[in-house]
Image (cartoon, rainbow, N blue to C red):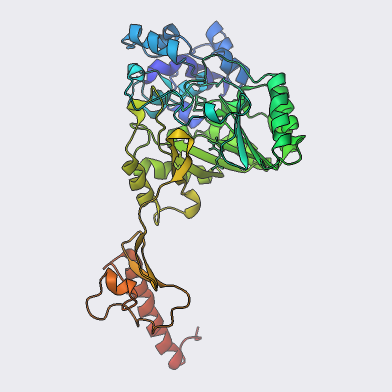
């Protein structure tokens, strides 16, 4: 199976003889490109680190795909899928595939599936009703102080789970100068908009000069304080993050970038280097993950992803419930799966590694955070909360001057006792934390003894 993706990988091992990236090393075969840079294939592949070469050489047809996946079946049906929802996979992203089948998360996110034509009635092309929130074509104004600009319909890789399947890749075109002037005028007339998100499609597939023109247009509006870019380029086309691009971007601070890693397998050396370049330019990085069945609907996978992200200086920002988009039914998970994942993360993983789980509401309701329930009960005087361990604790509201309950339980405390101030905590038995406290307590009492007998400061 690994050999299916060799044509794109072979070159890496020849070209970057100094230090081939580890993900590539996993799929390298010593016999695949025998005479260094001699064969036409190897010559062509030597441009691997040129992002434009990557874009020109994307896998776009089933014939091309079949070179990597010889066992490709249902071609007639797949052809219909890609006519409706185009396919594009950068050679780089293809090289991140480890198994050429749907059990591989990267394969699953990039290779079309006949289930995309499955069309249950609850799914629509534009479930967030973005189209109805566009005062100017391309500009979604939903929240009072923020607007989202659809700058291009092009991406280097078309995610099979894309929430803008209706737009992404149907044509590959960027916003026109005339439309951009309309956007500028709208922003001038709406100074309440202080934060503009450049999205698409993937805005970083545009040329440096096109991106710069857009940024300087936005910066010409004094009320625009923050500019954000939403891009999957660090994940699917990391060589796009060139020094020239980064030096240009940093002229437009405060500029934030949100990227879109969904699985720890995507955190390759190249992807991490791309993020490092952006972070070094002072660009705060966030990540938006979509919960996808068979890709990352697993607490441990999300844990590995989030830990990997903070090591990469990328702050997990949102984890999205899959939108009700036509063509993505096979990726959908239940809302309770997201709640389970959040329950798992809290208390187990650093707070900076925990994203907010949101459901982007149908009918344009915007993002709604969803959490496990931590408020257990409330009374006029106390709020009863639980923590991740199952500890139940009473928080007295201000102005309550009744006697505080001393220590934990007196007689059989229950939630009512906590809510009425008759008890202040119910502790779970034998947690690691409590065991540690017992040890600290034991050490402390022997230390007190030592001090009393004058031994504490003796060598
Ligand atoms: C997600 C989104 C935003 C930004 O929301 P934040 O919560 O500020 O990240 C703005 N506008 C639209 C239309 C969006 O979908
Ligand atoms: S990069 Fe974003 S816009 Fe492009 S296909 Fe993927 S999810 Fe859609």
Q: Quadrant of residue 52?
A: top right
Which residue is farthest left? 412
In the image, taking residue 99 as reference, residue 233 lies left or right, namely: right
Which residue is farthest bottom? 453
In the image, taking residue 215 as reference, residue 293 lies left or right, namely: left
Residue beneath the point at 35% across and 50% down: 344
Q: Quadrant of residue 368?
A: top left
Residue beneath the point at 37% across and 26% down: 123
In the image, taking residue 392 as reference, residue 351 lies left or right, namely: right
Residue beneath the point at 39% across and 54% down: 348
Which quarter of the figure is the N terminus placed in? top left
Judge whether 292 appears above or below 358 on screen: above
Residue 275 image offset from top left, x and y in percent: 59, 37
Residue 113 image offset from top left, x and y in percent: 36, 18
- In this orientation, which residue lies closer to the viewer: 321 or 48? 321
- In this orientation, which residue lies closer to the viewer: 13 or 459? 13
- In this orientation, which residue lies closer to the viewer: 260 or 24? 260
Residue 396 visible: yes
- In this orientation, which residue lies closer to the viewer: 454 or 132? 132
Judge whether 89 appears above or below 218 on screen: above
Residue 31 visible: no
Q: Quadrant of residue 437?
A: bottom left
Judge whether 137 appears above or below 351 on screen: above
Residue beneath the point at 38% across and 40% down: 301
Residue 455 image offset from top left, x and y in percent: 45, 89
In the image, taking residue 221 as reference, residue 428 lies left or right, namely: left
Residue 150 image offset from top left, x and y in percent: 59, 26
């Amino acid at each position: 199976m690994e050999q299916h993706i060799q044509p794109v990988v072979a070159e890496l091992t020849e070209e970057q003889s100094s230090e081939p990236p580890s993900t590539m090393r996993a799929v390298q075969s010593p016999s695949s490109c025998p005479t260094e840079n001699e064969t036409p294939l190897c010559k062509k592949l030597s441009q691997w680190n040129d992002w434009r070469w990557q874009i020109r050489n994307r896998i776009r047809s089933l014939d091309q795909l079949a070179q990597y996946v010889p066992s490709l079946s249902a071609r007639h049906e797949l052809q219909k899928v890609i006519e409706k929802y185009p396919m594009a996979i950068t050679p780089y992203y293809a090289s991140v595939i480890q198994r050429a089948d749907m059990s591989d998360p990267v394969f699953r996110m990039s290779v079309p599936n006949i289930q995309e034509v499955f069309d249950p009635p609850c799914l629509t092309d534009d479930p967030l009703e973005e189209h109805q929130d566009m005062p100017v074509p391309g500009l979604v104004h939903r929240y009072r102080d923020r607007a989202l600009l659809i700058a291009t319909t092009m991406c280097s890789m078309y995610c099979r789970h894309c929430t803008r399947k209706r737009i992404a890749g149907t044509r590959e075109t960027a916003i026109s100068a005339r439309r951009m002037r309309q956007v500028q005028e709208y922003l001038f007339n709406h100074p309440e908009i202080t934060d503009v998100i450049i999205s698409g499609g993937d805005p970083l597939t545009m040329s440096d000069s096109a991106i710069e023109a857009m940024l300087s247009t936005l910066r010409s509006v004094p009320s625009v304080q923050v500019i954000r870019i939403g891009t999957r380029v660090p994940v699917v086309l990391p060589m796009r993050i060139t020094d020239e691009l980064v030096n240009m971007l940093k002229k437009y601070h405060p500029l934030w970038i949100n990227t879109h890693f969904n699985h720890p397998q995507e955190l390759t050396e190249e992807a991490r280097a791309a993020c490092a370049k952006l972070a070094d330019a002072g660009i705060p990085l966030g990540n938006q993950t979509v919960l996808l069945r068979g890709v990352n609907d697993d607490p441990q996978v999300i844990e590995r992803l989030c830990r990997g992200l903070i090591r990469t200086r990328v702050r997990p920002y949102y984890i999205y419930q899959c939108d009700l988009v036509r063509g993505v039914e096979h990726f959908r998970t239940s809302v309770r799966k997201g709640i389970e994942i959040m329950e798992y993360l809290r208390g187990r993983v650093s707070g900076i590694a925990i994203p907010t789980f949101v459901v982007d509401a149908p009918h344009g309701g915007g993002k709604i955070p969803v959490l496990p329930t931590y408020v257990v009960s409330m009374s006029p005087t106390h709020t009863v909360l639980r923590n991740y361990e199952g500890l139940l604790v009473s928080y007295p509201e201000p102005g309550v001057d009744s006697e505080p309950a001393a220590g934990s339980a007196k007689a059989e405390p229950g939630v009512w006792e906590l809510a009425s101030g008759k008890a202040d905590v119910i502790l779970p038995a034998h947690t690691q934390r409590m065991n540690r406290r017992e040890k600290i307590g034991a050490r402390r009492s022997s230390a007190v003894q030592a001090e009393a007998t004058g031994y504490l400061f003796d060598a």
